[in-house]
Image (cartoon, rainbow, N blue to C red):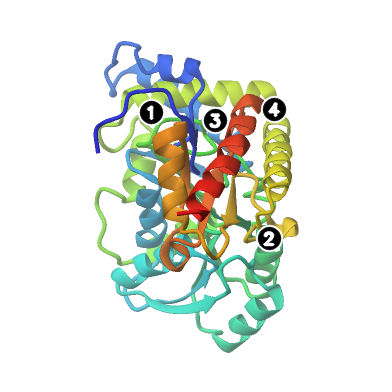
Amino acid sequence: MKYQQEQQNLRIPGPVPCPPEVIKAQTRPLIDHRSEDFAYMLKSLVGRLKRIFLTENDVFILTSSGTGALEASLVNTLSPGDKILAVVTGFFGQRYSDMAKALLIDVQELQFEWGQDVDIEILRKALVAHSDIKAVLVTHNETSTGVTNDLESISRVVKKEFGKLLLVDAVSSLGSVELKTDEWECDVVAAGSQKGLLTPPGLSVISFSQSAWRAYEKSCMPKYYNDLGLFRTFMGLGQTAFTPAISLLYALDKSLELILREGLPSFIGMQRDQAFMIRSKVRSLGLELLSEDRCAAHSVTAVKVPGNVNSDDLVDLLREEFRIVVGRGQGRLKGKLFRVGHIGKVPERDIEDLILALSSALTRVASK
């Protein structure tokens, strides 16, 4: 496929369209990452991120995709052979579980039907059955299915009733869904830059509680680049442990400024309202959504296609003829649905263009 430079209506769960000010911020001249100027910027960034995480815990910025922060959540708190419970409600929950398996962790999976959220009573029974587990992994916002899990209720069971470590994949929820890290006692929360933080891909962020640090002291998992102990030491010097992506930090600095200027509750509320609008308009075309409204994500909507339509053909037609890019179905949902991302501010014109293109494309694909 030829490299496309034309303007597209990018409606995938991430990377998301970034505000022009954020893109422009990357063009600033580079600075010495061991300088006082950098230390000032890093301190400011971490302070702002804590306001997004709603935490007083340590927060670190890694030069990696969100997957790097997820791996950091595991290698800094666990050891090979530790038994954990991985809660799986979709493709990315499965990937978090598979990552733990690759690290030789003893993973017990709690599987839920894709498109459904976590059943708290089933989770409680699993924790009773596996009383010797050390930690619980959960994906807060499952973008493969358009489902947001009730992290507050999950935490109430995991932390208050059973006292286990809670490791959270918030790659697509931080900044787009309510997430109260400290109030909900989340021990580790990992996220990426390219979704709710409205920054180009390449950075990940992670919060780390005191309970997580106690687990770190006992962990014997091999680690070096993702050793958060090193990051904590260098943070005391106003530095990162390794060479950071300085231009992306400029972009993150600007995006956090924009989000906090609007106010986090308002920013999340805007995305909630957009999600409701998009779900309503998609349903007006006679299409069915994968998730129920009570657990539907603010960040992405998973839309089923009729039985006579292959969703990949629909996605290709939208991209090639209408310059609208939506996400494909993943894993067992491939060919069965498409996903519309709506993180950040989505112009109403883009929504209208999407619905008109969908109406036309559906008719053409179904008649093939």
Q: Evaluate if marks 2 and 4 touch, with contact meaning CB atoms under 8 Å apart.
A: no
Reading the image, the residue beneath label 4 is: 263
Q: Evaluate if marks 4 and 3 touch, with contact meaning CB atoms under 8 Å apart.
A: no
Residue 238, disc: 1
Q: Evaluate if marks 2 and 3 touch, with contact meaning CB atoms under 8 Å apart.
A: no
Q: Earlier in the sequence, mark 2 or mark 4?
A: 2
Residue 21, disc: none
Quadrant where the C terminus sits is bottom left
Q: Earlier in the sequence, mark 4 or mark 3?
A: 3
- Secondary structure of the residue carrying numbered label 2: loop
Q: Please state which of residues 7 and 249 is positioned toward the viewer in this rendering.
A: 7
- Looking at the rendered structure, the kind of residue marked 2 is Asp
Residue at 34%, 22% in the rendered image:
247
- Secondary structure of the residue carrying numbered label 4: loop
Q: Position of residue 325 (x, y in %)?
A: 46, 38
Reading the image, the residue beneath label 2 is: 150
Mark-to-mark CA distance, 2 and 3: 26 Å
Q: Position of residue 331 (x, y in %)?
A: 41, 65
Residue 47, disc: 3
